[in-house]
Amino acid sequence: MLEYRAEGLCRSADKLTMEELRAACAAGEILQSTALVFDTMRQLQFRLCGHRGIMPFTECADGAADGQIRDIAVLTRVGRPTCFVIKEFRRLADGEEILILSRAMAQRACRRNYLDKLEAGTVIPCTVTHIENFGAFCDVGCGISSLLPIDCLSVSRISSPADRVSVGQQLLCAVKCRDTQGRLVLTLRELLGTWSENAACFSPGETVVGIVRSVEEYGVFVEIAPNLAGLAESSGNLCPGQVVSVYIKNILPEKMKIKLVIVNKNISQSLRFEPHYFITEGRMKSWIYSTPQSHKQIETVF
């Protein structure tokens, strides 16, 4: 079965022989190489085994043939790994043999054979491609983009997706649902563990590093893991995103609360917690973050 990976992770065509390229063409294998030029004929050009690879504009993305893709979406591929299938080998009148490439065919195959078959709750790999205030866009295969909304990045409150992920970062996400156009919407927080799973990684009496997430009149919420935050008493001159060290005073599962004491608020280094996955494969039908004793219910039903 063919694998449909994010661009940058497909098999590189750069060092393949002509025999290997012909075999990949026959098999419909998805390859990648760096686009070198977007020329005046609106084609992407590549260099494969000493031969020119040409990707006509209509083959640069699914939807380009229907006018749904703007030039800017194609010319920004220059200098970046770009996936494709080899559509044909063509000999020109002057005897030059070129390769006709199609990213659009790779994307259609990815949708038909992979993405369209995914069910809600299925765990898939993806790569962050760009970040907006409302969420992160991720490549779920062959350059096809899906949204990871900011409220799906973690249970712990964040002010920007950049607090949790960065461009180029490889993630595991779950399929949350499909939007009105049938595109996948992703979620990460369900893979990062329940309150109990995260709290079990800490003990009262420990002092750990944390990130201030919000400052309220009644206290300061400090994140100590992507899906876990505690409350400390108010302390002056604190702002969201600030790195502090905190003493864990108490852990209360029945209330889903962690009581903290701020020890050091003069830590100058930056910090972003990397994802710690408690689920890495398969399909979830539901997920409950809350503890059994808690009256507050945080649940996802896929």
Image (cartoon, rainbow, N blue to C red):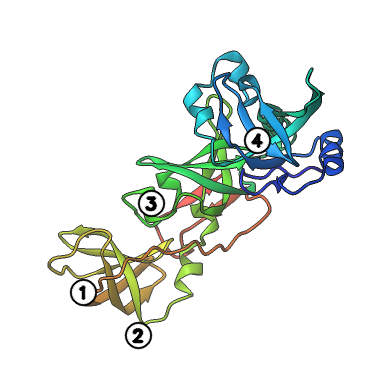
Q: Which mark is residue 162?
A: 3
- Residue 111: image quadrant is top right
Q: First in sequence: mark 1 or mark 3?
A: 3
At x 65% / y 35%, what residue is drawn?
46
Q: Amino acid at mark 3?
A: Ala
Q: First in sequence: mark 3 or mark 4?
A: 4
Residue 250 visible (yes or no): yes
Q: First in sequence: mark 2 or mark 4?
A: 4
Secondary structure state at the residue bearing disc 2:
loop
- Residue at image mark 1: 266
Q: Position of residue 209 (x, y in %)?
A: 34, 74
- Residue at image mark 4: 46
Q: Position of residue 263 (x, y in %)?
A: 23, 79
Left or right for 31, reference 231: right
At x 30% / y 73%, what residue is drawn?
259
Q: Which mark is residue 205?
A: 2
Front disc: 3 or 4: 4
Find the residue positioned furthest to the left.
Answer: 236
Disc 2 + disc 1, Cβ < 8 Å: no
Residue in front for this viewpoint, 40 or 116: 40
CA distance for labels 3 and 4:
33 Å
Find the residue positioned furthest to the front.
Answer: 94
At x 44% / y 52%, what residue is drawn?
166
CA distance for labels 1 and 3:
22 Å
CA distance for labels 4 and 1:
51 Å
CA distance for labels 2 and 4:
59 Å
Q: Amino acid at mark 2?
A: Gly
Residue 302 visible (yes or no): no
Residue in front for this viewpoint, 235 or 57: 57
Q: Amino acid at mark 4?
A: Phe
Front disc: 3 or 2: 3
Left or right for 85, reference 120: right
